[in-house]
Amino acid sequence: MPKNKNNIFLIGPMGSGKTSVAKKLSEKLGKQFADTDVKISNKTGVDINYIFDIEGEVGFRKREEATLKECILKNNIVLSTGGGIVLSVNNRLLLKKHGMVVYLETSVESQEV
């Protein structure tokens, strides 16, 4: 897969504002917005919690990696990722190779619920 440094990947803990920031950033920069959790939910027809309940974390992480692999093929996207996407070494390498990675830092007190 060729490198694509036009993509921006937002990572960070759950509730750090990745989706909100990604939407605003994509509008400002004229890039396509995408969200791995939304893509997984749309593809399966169920919410993320249900996938965790039925398939466990291992099953969800497989879906997450497959979704990331689909997203990195696109050009000029701002991608909001799930909070645990960086748990996989392979995912970290894919993110680094195919765009600019931005970590959103937040305190526990300021996390969105």
Image (cartoon, rainbow, N blue to C red):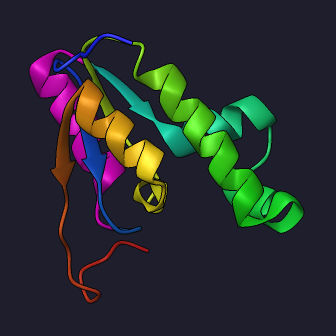
Quadrant where the C terminus is found in the figure: bottom left
User: Closest to the observer: 60 or 14?
Assistant: 60
Q: Position of residue 30 (x, y in %)?
A: 17, 15
User: In the displayed structure, would residue 100 be above or below residue 108?
Assistant: above
Q: Is residue 78 left or right of residue 113?
A: left
- Asked whether residue 91 appears in the rendered view, the answer is yes
Q: Is residue 28 left or right of residue 76?
A: left
Quadrant where the N terminus is found in the figure: top left
Q: Is residue 85 left or right of residue 56?
A: left
- Residue positioned 51% across, 27% down in the render: 69
Membership of 24 in magenta stretch: yes
- Residue positioned 21% across, 83% down in the render: 107
- Residue positioned 30% across, 62% down in the render: 12
Please name the predominant secondary structure of the magenta segment in the image: helix
User: Exactly how many numbered labels are in the figure?
Assistant: 0
The span shown in magenta is 16-31
Q: Position of residue 59 (x, y in %)?
A: 76, 53
> Most extreme residue toward the right, as rendered?
54
Q: Position of residue 90 (x, y in %)?
A: 45, 44
Q: Position of residue 28 (x, y in %)?
A: 11, 26
Membership of 30 in magenta stretch: yes
- Residue positioned 22% across, 47% down in the render: 21
